[in-house]
């Protein structure tokens, strides 16, 4: 396994991380636990979750699976999206973040998280309140590093400016949708991250499976594919994205790679990327994804991947989660 610093922090994370939003839904408890242990066996140390994933079941599963192994991982979770129906059940206010962190720590069976991420920008709470709260949580020892997710470039830059001005803990990372099928971060967020020393953490690196080859033939989609278990995902399945998936599969076959491994390896070559989080619902999927770490892409292959995905630098992000 290869490791990189998270931005300009001293934290070392595996270049491939494991995303857990399917734990407790598309992967049951036993399978999820087996995937976590398998990931650790192969040197993956970055595990990403959130307080809302599968109604908090993801955090519970991870907490149980890491009993006796907590010291082996860089554990990341998030808060900020809608958690319930109450007036303070979402956002990045002090009351919500402190409450949600305590609840996450209980579910995760730990007294600290390595990376605490704001799940999306909160337009209703002053940024200074959010950043002071995060600074307090770092000083308390409950949080080691802080990160943002689903921020626009101006929102991220404003937050960094306030942290620098007030001497508060600073975001070390930005988590965003980034893949061959979504290169929109390259317009602003990647340049900001390079300039400000943030580590980029791509989610949806396989575009929900479009870049894995499973959607090349509409008549042979696996029963547990995201399009089957999450019908709203079908909005992303159009001729443009499906054609990209077919092109990636063709190029991968020409060079002896799987489409998933090739797509992940491409992301690992992008500026500022620290760790690529990818989900898995079966052990064989994780093994396929792990192949990406050993791939050394030639400039020619990178250039070809850049070319076939160039149009995906423009338009709307593949995914961008915001408060209502």
Image: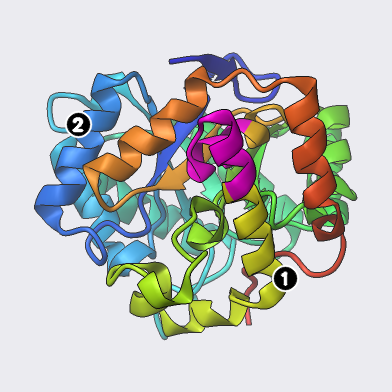
User: Looking at the magenta stretch, what is its main secondary structure?
Assistant: helix
- Quadrant in which the C terminus appears: bottom right
Determine crowd level at label 2: few under 14, some 14-19, many 20+ residues with C-alpha closer than 10 A: some
Percent x, y of residue 114: 44, 31
Secondary structure type for disc 2: helix
Which numbered disc, 2 or 1, marks the residue closer to the eye? 1
Residue 231, picture quadrant = bottom left
Q: Which region of the structure is painted magenta?
A: 250-265
Question: Considering only vertical position in the picture, is 73 above or below 1?
Answer: below
Residue 253 part of the magenta-drawn span = yes
Whole-percent x, y for residue 192 in the image: 86, 39
Q: Is residue 180 above or below residue 113?
A: below
Determine the residue positioned at 13% across, 54% down.
29
Q: Nearer the viewer, residue 93 or 157?
A: 157
Q: Position of residue 89 (x, y in %)?
A: 45, 75
Residue located 40% across and 69% down the image: 226
Residue at 20% x, 53% y: name it: 60
- Does 74 sit left or right of 6 as displayed? left
Q: Which mark is residue 240?
A: 1
Relative to 95, is 169 above or below?
Answer: above
Compared with 189, 74 (above or below) is above
Graded by Cα atoms within 10 Å as few (under 14), some (14 to 19) or many (20 or more), the crowding at tag 1 reads: few
Q: Residue furthest left?
A: 30
Q: Identify the secondary structure beneath mark 1.
A: helix
Which residue is under mark 2? 37
Give me the C-alpha separation between circle 2 and circle 1. 37 Å
Question: Does residue 268 show up?
Answer: yes
Please state if 128 lies on the left or on the right of 66 as rendered: right
Image location of residue 241, percent across then percent down: 67, 67
Residue 89 visible? The answer is: no
């Amino acid at each position: 396994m290869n490791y990189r610093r998270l931005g300009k922090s001293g934290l070392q994370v595996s270049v491939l991380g494991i995303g857990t939003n399917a734990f407790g839904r598309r992967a049951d408890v036993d399978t999820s636990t087996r995937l976590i242990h398998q990931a650790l066996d192969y040197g993956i140390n970055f595990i990403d979750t959130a307080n809302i994933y599968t109604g908090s079941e993801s955090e519970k599963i991870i907490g149980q699976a890491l009993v006796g192994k907590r010291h082996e991982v860089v554990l990341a979770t998030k808060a900020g999206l809608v958690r319930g129906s109450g007036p303070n059940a979402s956002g990045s206010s002090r009351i919500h973040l402190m409450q949600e962190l305590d609840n996450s720590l209980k579910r995760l069976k730990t007294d600290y998280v390595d990376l605490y991420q704001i799940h999306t920008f909160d337009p209703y709470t002053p940024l200074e309140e959010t950043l002071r709260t995060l600074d307090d949580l770092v000083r308390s020892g409950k949080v080691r590093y802080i990160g943002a997710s689903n921020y626009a470039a101006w929102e991220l830059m404003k937050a960094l400016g306030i942290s620098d001005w007030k001497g508060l803990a600073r975001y070390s990372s930005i988590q965003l949708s980034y893949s061959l099928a979504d290169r929109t971060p390259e317009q602003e967020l990647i340049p900001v991250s390079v300039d400000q020393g943030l580590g980029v953490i791509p989610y949806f690196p396989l575009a929900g499976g479009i870049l894995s080859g499973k959607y090349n033939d509409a008549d042979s989609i696996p029963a547990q594919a995201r399009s089957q278990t999450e019908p709203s995902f079908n909005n992303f399945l159009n001729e443009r994205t499906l054609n990209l998936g077919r092109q990636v599969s063709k190029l991968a076959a020409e060079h002896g790679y799987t489409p998933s491994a090739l797509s992940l390896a491409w992301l690992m070559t992008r500026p500022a990327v620290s760790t690529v989080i990818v989900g898995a619902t079966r052990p064989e999927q994780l093994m396929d994804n792990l192949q990406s770490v050993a791939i050394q892409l030639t400039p020619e292959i990178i250039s070809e991947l850049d070319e076939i995905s160039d149009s995906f630098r423009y338009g709307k992000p593949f995914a961008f989660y915001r408060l209502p």
